Amino acid sequence: MCQYVFGYVSIELGSIGKVSMCKRIMKAETSPDGDVPFYKIGTFGKKPDAYISREKFEEYRKAYSFPKKGDVLISAAGTIGRTVIYDGEDAYYQDSNIVWIDNDESVVLNRYLFYCYQLQPWAVSEGGTIARLYNDNISRAKISVPSIEEQKRIIAILDRFDTLCIDLSSGLPAEIEARQKQYEYYRDKLLTFTPAD
């Protein structure tokens, strides 16, 4: 791995870790309710509509690839490149459609990867029924990587913007509701008269 003295280096994602995925779960092993959420490509980043048993989850999590808390999951089919940071909660992910790079964060921080993935021009294969992002396409994709300190600075700035955007979309309705309640309170106070004796 090249070490950067000034600026950044351009690296292939395969040089920071192996593309990994969960073990295949068959449809017969899922149910509409249950112990552990099972995310498929259509529910990735949303509310799950399938679950697997706690026993199957524990067995597969111990025996096969499973993301670490903080790993950045990538959709490799459907909405190509959608990303979710794995929060460590018990959940299982559809094999080959949802993947991650097993990254130890010695060169690239996962949060930095999260932002890079959003801009990544993924090389998508469109020969089949649906477009796919194959493991080789992910491994060969290049990103620009500054020092860890610079990554932290970039992350802090982008996180602030992300929080601001979330606050605007969730904060404005809450603020409008609070002002409406305040208006109703003062309206009722101002227009409620007590009879004079």
Image: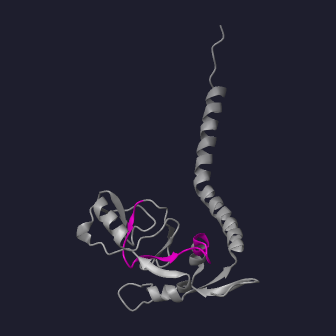
Quarter of the image for the C terminus: give it.
Answer: top right
How many numbered dots are placed on residues in this image? 0
Residue nearest the observer in this picture, 53 or 58: 58
Q: Residue 131: image x %, image y %?
A: 42, 85
153 in relation to 8, above or below? above
Quadrant of the rendered structure where residue 7 is? bottom right
Give percent across and percent down for residue 82: 49, 74
Which residue reaches farthest left?
Answer: 28
Taking the view exactly as shown, the residue that stands out farthest to the top is: 197
Indicate the position of residue 95 as horizontal and vertical percent values.
36, 76
Magenta region? 90-113
Q: Residue furthest bottom?
A: 127
Identify the residue shown where x is 39% and y is 73%: 41
Q: Is residue 117 above or below residue 180?
A: below
Task: Please identify the quarter of the rendering in which residue 97 is found.
Answer: bottom left
Q: Is residue 12 left or right of residue 128?
A: right
Question: Which residue is located at x 41 percent, y 71 percent?
Answer: 66
Residue at 46% x, 81% y is: 19
- Does 49 sit left or right of 101 as displayed? left
Q: Is residue 127 visible?
A: yes
- Regarding residue 53, the answer to whether it shows in the image is no
Residue at 29% from the left image edge and 61% from the top image edge: 55
Q: Quadrant of the N terminus?
A: bottom right
Quadrant location of residue 77?
bottom left
Q: Name the residue nearer the viewer: 16 or 21.
A: 16
Q: Position of residue 115 (x, y in %)?
A: 60, 73
Quick one: 99 or 63, which is closer to the camera? 63
Q: Colour mode?
A: one colour
9 magenta-colored: no
Q: Taking 14 as reference, is 164 above or below it? A: above
Residue 96 painted magenta: yes
